[in-house]
Image (tube, helix red, strand yellow):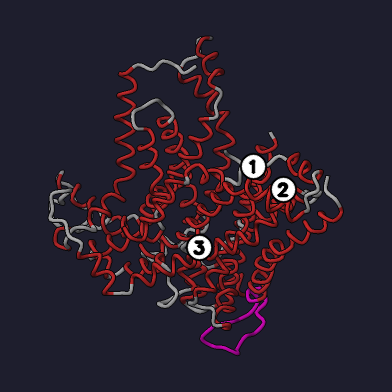
Amino acid sequence: MATAHSRIAARFMLAPAVLMLLCWMIVPLAMTIYFSFLRYNLLMPGMEQWAGFDNYSYFLTDPAFFTALKNTLLLVGGVLLITVIGGTLLALLLDQAMYGQGFVRIMVIAPFFVMPTVSALVWKNMFMNPVNGLFAYMAKAVGLQPFDFLSQAPLASIILIVAWQWLPFAALILLTAMQSLDREQMEAAEMDGAGTFSRFIYIVVPHLTRAVTVVILIQTIFLLSVFAEILVTTNGGPGNASTNITYLVYAQSLLQFDVGGGSAGGIVAVILANIVAIFLMRMIGKNLEA
Amino acid sequence: MARAVSTRHKTIVTILAWSIGFLIFFPILWTVLTSFKTEAEAVASPPSFLNFSWTLENYTEVQSRSNYARHFYNSVVISVGSTLLGLLIAIPAAWSMAFVPTRRTKDILMWMLSTKMLPPVGVLIPIYLIFRDTGLLDSVPGLVVVLTLINLPIIVWMLYTYFKEIPGEILEAARMDGATLWSEIIHVLTPMAVPGIASTLLLNIILAWNEAFWTLNLTAANAAPLTAFIASYSSPEGLFYAKLSAASTMAIAPILIMGWFSQKQLVRGLTFGAVK
């Protein structure tokens, strides 16, 4: 349908977006790769030297790297587990007939719109603080010792905070998917004598597979880069107990000024994210074609 | 046909859903309530829920202690500015892919999606150094550019899925009637595309407002938006609960209200059109 004229116009219209994204991806990434092979510290400008793979071998043999890798996986996995299961249950509940459904939806979706630094600080100070936090009051009220969440279980506490932020997202997407479920199919199954549980397993779950895949893909992208929540609550500590890869690279490059080491870490993070991305894109690709 | 639901069942579901909804919403409610307490009441034991003397002093104090209005203004400029700039670049791109698709359109879309998967730490150091050397560090225009680029794939995808729904036959009819490319865009496409553009705008302002990696790493006192300003409360001011709450309430209120209006678009935008 398109004329040659409009085809050329279309190319020109697409070009700025493509070129800008290309520059955004290629230029800094190439610089990071270059820096990762240098001995380069911001405190010693002009002393850059070729370092070969030294930065990589330091980064990859640093025990902090394995702690951070483990923490990253626990953080992503923990939040996914809570939000997918919790989100499914919430979506099932919100899909039922009730009074004031719109209002409940508004309450449930709200945490997603709270900026990460606010939600992390509110949880840290007003809920998890062992002296003045609400959880401490509740513990004391029933005669228990207040628990110092962020120093005794820092990673679990951060998982809880991040899960609270992402639960609404999972619930909303799964609810949207559930509302597109064919009601007649459900009724037919019911008439054929399928119970609530088997209707859930054989009709609802397969219908939700695609939405769950999408939830996992998108959350993983964001969760691999959790940063603000760690920065304002624990600074990665105590020790490295709540440091993820993103935070480790930040600390190495912008706190210790080790550009070379930080860049090597950044490239490792890119490779890890790509492994996840390939795996997930394939999964979602299959789902999208179906 | 809707299934008949017994009143008893409906009542139980209502009570359950309201309780869980309240529990999830509670931290936000608690923050808003605490912002109206005095510092002493904010840490009182047992905590008071509604029966305290309401005060606005925290709001005035937050502004006088640090120029809160300035950070709020930065947030507005950065989120709205990056969104408008993004739309300016993305509308032609999405238009061209939706109406003049080529063999490579799908690949370009997938590639754009993949740029979103690049972890920010992979490019943090070069961006930081480039910004430092060009004086863009801690500047509002610098952040506008970065946020435009990180959200551009989402804007393009979202617009693309909306434009795709505009029937191509209408364009052909307009062309038959002698419409030029330009008048086709102005008179035929734009009116049909406005709702899609509006929801893209809304969602993107929300995302940019809450972005907390680049805003924390590329700003200091000068260009800090609210995300970075609130982070400065992490210690020791965080122990002043009432002031933290007042600053937080003002930071989340506008976006909370916008968010509630854009629930539907949120699903579509964040799933790249995969779930509608």
Which percent across, then down, holds residue A116?
41, 58
Q: Secondary structure at mark 1?
A: helix
Residue A79 versus residue B216 in the image, above or below: above
Quadrant of the snapshot with the N terminus of chain A: top right
**Quarter of the figure with residue B63:** bottom left
Asked if labels 2 and 3 share a chain, the reply is yes
Left or right of A160 on screen, residue B212: right
Question: Which residue, given by chain and number where applicable, does mark 2 sit on?
Answer: B98
Query: CA separation, marks 1 and 2?
Result: 22 Å
Q: Chain of mark 1?
A: A
Earlier along the polypeptide chain: callout 2 or callout 3? 3
The answer to whether the residues at label 2 and label 3 have Cβ atoms under 8 Å apart is no
**Does the magenta run of residues contain A231?**
no
Residue drawn at the location 13% of the way across and 53% of the way down? B52
**Quarter of the figure with residue B93:** bottom right
Label drawn at residue B80? 3
Depth check: give the residue in front, B269 or A146. Answer: B269
Residue drawn at the location 58% of the way across and 67% of the way down? A266
